[in-house]
Each structure stands twice: as C-alpha cells, then as structure tokens.
Image: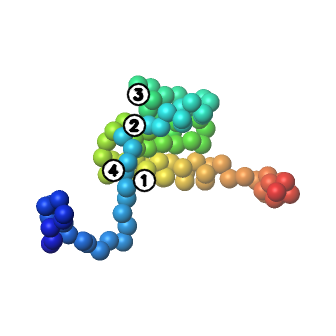
Amino acid sequence: MGISRLGIRARIIDVDTVIVAVGRTPNPIIQLTTDGLETIKYGTSLVDGAAGKTSLDGVYGGGDIVTGEATVISAMGAGKRAARSIHEYLAQHQPSAEQQSASTVQQ
C-alpha cells in the first residue's frame, strides 16, 4: 500500500473487469425520443413486474431507468431478469422462414 500525493492510502489491484456506474437518474433523451414509452415520476420507465417489460412490445428495462438511483448490484439483477424475459420473448416471436427470406432479400 502506498501514499498518494494527497496523503490518501492507495493500492493497485489486478482486475479482469471494471464496471463504471456514472448515472444516477434516467437519461431524459430516452423518454423524449421514444414514442409510446410510458414513464412515471422522475422519468423512470413503467415496467410490468420483475420481467422488466415496458409499455412497448419487445422493449425491456432495468436499473436506474426503472427504479431510479439504486445500487449496481440491483441493476445487474434487473438486467439478468430482463435478459431472461427477452430470451422468452424472442423464443415466442421467431420469424417464419418466409420472413427471414424476405429480410435477407431486402438487405
């Protein structure tokens, strides 16, 4: 452990990943640019329970956009639950072979 120029004890540690959490409130641009997204107090998105489903079909949310300021751990849990719901949604909404073919032709 060393002492920094400010007199604060500091230590360098090896890590694989660092998650930077810089937001504390929902980004107001989202609600201003996303027609049909229902929001409530302080601009948080209204979701359907733990699944994180918003008022828009196929759109899910978690973390500060739903709860407002909270912990990173809480946001990660919400993201995991939303990912599970997204997986279920996509499994139920698989495009038909005709739709896939048409999509490929349009590209």
Mark number displayed over residue 72: 4
Q: Which of 64 and 18 is in front in this view?
A: 18
Give how far across and how far down residue 45 sits, in percent: 47, 33
Q: What residue type is labelled 1?
A: Lys
Q: Residues within 10 Å of mark 1 (few under 14, many from 20)?
A: some
Q: In this view, does 97 lie above or below 66?
A: below
Outermost residue, bottom side? 14
- Which amino acid type is marked by label 3? Tyr
Image point (24%, 71%), residue name: 12
Q: Which of marks 1 and 2 is nearer the N terminus?
A: 2
Of callouts 1 and 3, the N-terminal one: 3
Distance between the alpha carbons at the discs numbered 1 and 3: 24 Å
Quick one: label 3, few (<14), some, or many (20+) residues within 10 Å? few
Q: Label 3 belongs to which residue?
A: 42
Q: Give the residue displayed 54% in from the left and 36% down from the top.
A: 30
Q: What residue type is labelled 4?
A: Val
Amino acid type shown at disc 2: Thr
Which residue matches tag 1? 80
- 13 relative to 45, above or below: below
Local SS, label 4: helix
Helix, strand or loop for disc 2: loop
Judging depth in this view, the residue of 49 and 11 nearest the camera is: 11
Marks 1 and 2 sit apart, C-alpha to C-alpha, by: 20 Å
